[in-house]
Amino acid sequence: MRVDKHALSVTTDAAGAGTATTVSPLNGHVEEVRYGGTILAGTATFTLTRVGDGGTILAYTATAAPWSRAPLQPVHSSVGGGALVAATGGSALADRVPVDGYVQLVVANAGSVLTDSVSIFVC
């Protein structure tokens, strides 16, 4: 299985907010989102979304760096209900988040005028 790494470099403004979008469309499933820096951590909020439909890939708040997350989305049955491990209760099933287009990172509460990057791994 091929895994591609895409880095999103983001610079925050005086209020500690910043936005970055991938330079090319991504296609596949998001395996991992990783932040190895330190300057955007602590109180920062990271939100990663698909630009085309606005679907959330990852929303992570008040982070301590470094961090790594493997985002999952709920799996639904053919009638739209949440799929469970057992027919009568159990844990909800989840699967990797698909992406087919541009991805946007929004950072908030990160500190004034800082630059760092977040990596997205897609296969």
Image (cartoon, grey):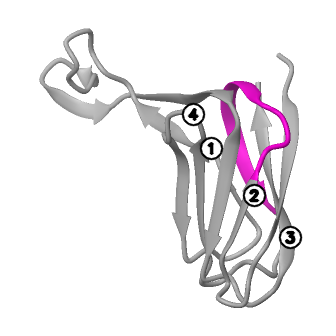
Instruction: State the SS at label 3.
Output: strand
Residue flagged by tag 2: what amino acid is it?
Ala
Q: Tell me residue 78's x, y (percent).
A: 26, 9
- Of callouts 2 and 3, the N-terminal one: 2
Give the mark nearest the N terminus, 3 or 1: 1
Three-letter amino acid code at the position of disc 4: Gly
Question: Which residue in the rendered view is the most extreme toward the left?
Answer: 88
Check disc 4 and report the residue beneath it. 52
Do the numbered discs 4 and 3 sit on residues whose CB atoms are within 8 Å?
A: no
* Marks 4, 3: nearer the viewer: 4
Q: Which of the two labelled residues, at mark 1 and mark 4, occupies the earlier sequence position?
A: 4
At label 3, which amino acid type do we have?
Answer: Asp
Magenta-colored stretch includes residue 22: yes
Residue in the picture at 75% in, 78% down: 12
Neighbours of disc 3 within 10 Å: few (<14), some (14-19), many (20+): some
Q: Label 1, on which residue?
A: 70
Task: List x then y, in percent, for residue 88.
Answer: 12, 23
- Whether residue 84 is in magenta: the answer is no
**Magenta residues (range):** 21-35
Instruction: Determine the main secondary structure of the stretch shown in magenta.
Output: strand
Q: Amino acid at mark 1?
A: Ala
Task: Judge from the rendering whether residue 79 lies leftward or rightward of residue 17; answer left or right.
Answer: left
State the CA–CA distance, disc 3 to disc 1.
20 Å
- Within-10-Å neighbours for mark 2: few <14, some 14–19, many 20+: some
Per the model, the C-alpha gap separating discs 1 and 4 is 21 Å
Separation of disc 2 and disc 3 at Cα?
A: 11 Å
